Amino acid sequence: MRILRLPAVSELTGLPRSTLYLYMSKGFFPKPIKLGVKSVGWIQEEVDQWLRQKMESRAS
């Protein structure tokens, strides 16, 4: 399992921080896990799965 920090998630998805947090608040993007008092990270497999779903919906 690999944990991604915000810059890596933003680079991988092409989305800025504000959009990622907006999508999370609406339940459209995986929620991060708490790593410390002021740090969070995303499970890479969950981000990869979200991207796969976006690509599959494009093909429909």
Image: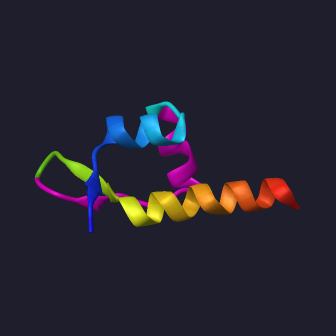
Looking at the picture, how far across and down is residue 25, in whole percent?
Answer: 52, 53
Q: Pick whichever, 26 or 52, lies toward us.
A: 52
The reply to whether residue 30 is in sight is no
Looking at the picture, how far across and down is residue 45, in whole percent?
Answer: 42, 65
Quadrant (top left, top right, bottom left, bottom right) of the C terminus: bottom right
Looking at the picture, how far across and down is residue 47, in whole percent?
Answer: 47, 57
Tell me which corner region of the image, top left, top right, bottom left or bottom right, holds residue 26: bottom right
- Tell me the residue at 22%/59% (across/down): 34
- Tell me the residue at 57%/60% (across/down): 50
Q: Determine whether, in the image, residue 9 is placed left or right of residue 34.
A: right
- Tell me the residue at 37%/59% (across/down): 44
Q: Which residues are magenta?
A: 18-36
Q: Determine whether, in the image, residue 37 is placed left or right of residue 6.
A: left
Q: Where is 35 relative to 18, above or below?
A: below
Asked if residue 47 is among those painted magenta in the image, a careful observer would answer no
Asked if residue 22 is among those painted magenta in the image, a careful observer would answer yes
Q: Determine whether, in the image, residue 28 is placed left or right of residue 36.
A: right
Q: Where is 31 relative to 9, above or below?
A: below
Q: Where is 50 relative to 17, above or below?
A: below
- Tell me the residue at 74%/62% (across/down): 56
The reply to whether residue 11 is in sight is yes
